Image (cartoon, rainbow, N blue to C red):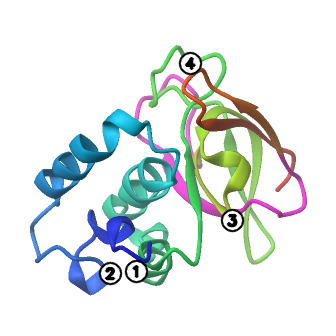
Amino acid sequence: AELGWMMLPFQEADGGMQAEGRTGAGDIAALYEALGPGLLVEPLLEGSILAGGLIAQSPGPARNADMLGEIAAGSVRAAAAPHEPRTRNDLLYCETKAAKGGAGWVLSGKKSMALGGPGADQLAILARAEGAPGDGGAGLALFLVPADSAGVTVTPYILRDDHWAADVELKDA
């Protein structure tokens, strides 16, 4: 974060380095070409590119410019949790449910292989606010959930490339 790597994918308006309409893909590719031989174990892919990318591309309240600025500055570590154990990598088949409750939403379900999940402060959770699991993208929503929230269980494990991932269980979180 101190070197500015975490802000590469974000627009200037969100605390990043990119002009409006630019993705930073070329800058990120050049950085990864330099870092690749060392298999750098840092939250750049997990936090900025995956979680930050989901947040930046989300319409509505999930697109949180303040959160993007905090990710870019390195003051918040984020992880994306879109995958589920039974979906065979089909992101649109989502069994995790979101229901309106109180002043916000209540989430229940299981997510698998959240890259960077064990060290994350915030989880970008894909959940179904409407419809049934096989309904495709209709009814899906992105939620930012503090990893230490009540009802959130993060089970960490290490991958073959020494990166960390986690399974995330949400019980009325």
Q: How crowded is mark 2: few (under 14 residues within 10 Å), some or many (20 or more)?
A: many
Q: Nearer the observer, disc 1 or disc 3?
A: 3
Q: Please, what secondary structure does the residue beneath circle 1 have?
A: helix
Q: Where is residue 159 in the image (x, y as percent from the top left)?
A: 62, 25
Callout 3 touching callout 2 (CB < 8 Å):
no
Q: Which amino acid does label 3 sit on?
A: Asp
Q: How crowded is mark 4: few (under 14 residues within 10 Å), some or many (20 or more)?
A: some
Q: Residues within 10 Å of mark 3 (few under 14, many from 20)?
A: some
Q: Name the residue under label 1.
A: 65
Q: Which of marks 3 and 2 is nearer the N terminus?
A: 2
Q: Which of marks 4 and 2 is nearer the N terminus?
A: 2
Q: Residue at x 49, y 57 (%)?
A: 47
Q: Which of marks 2 and 1 is nearer the N terminus?
A: 2
Q: Distance between the residues labelled 2 and 1?
A: 5 Å
Region rendered in magenta? 129-153
Callout 2 touching callout 1 (CB < 8 Å):
yes
Q: Where is residue 79 in the image (x, y as percent from the top left)?
A: 57, 52
Q: Which amino acid does label 2 sit on?
A: Asp
Q: Distance between the residues labelled 4 and 2?
A: 32 Å
Q: Mark 3 points at which residue?
A: 121
Q: Mark 4 points at which residue?
A: 87
Q: Quadrant of the N terminus?
A: bottom left
Which one is in front, 171 or 5?
Answer: 5
Q: Nearer the observer, disc 3 or disc 4?
A: 3
Mainly helix, strand or loop, the magenta region? loop
Q: Which mark is residue 14?
A: 2
Q: Where is residue 39 in the image (x, y as percent from the top left)?
A: 43, 36
Q: Earlier in the sequence, mark 3 or mark 4?
A: 4
Callout 4 touching callout 2 (CB < 8 Å):
no
Q: Nearer the observer, disc 4 or disc 2?
A: 2
Q: Please, what secondary structure does the residue beneath circle 2 have?
A: helix
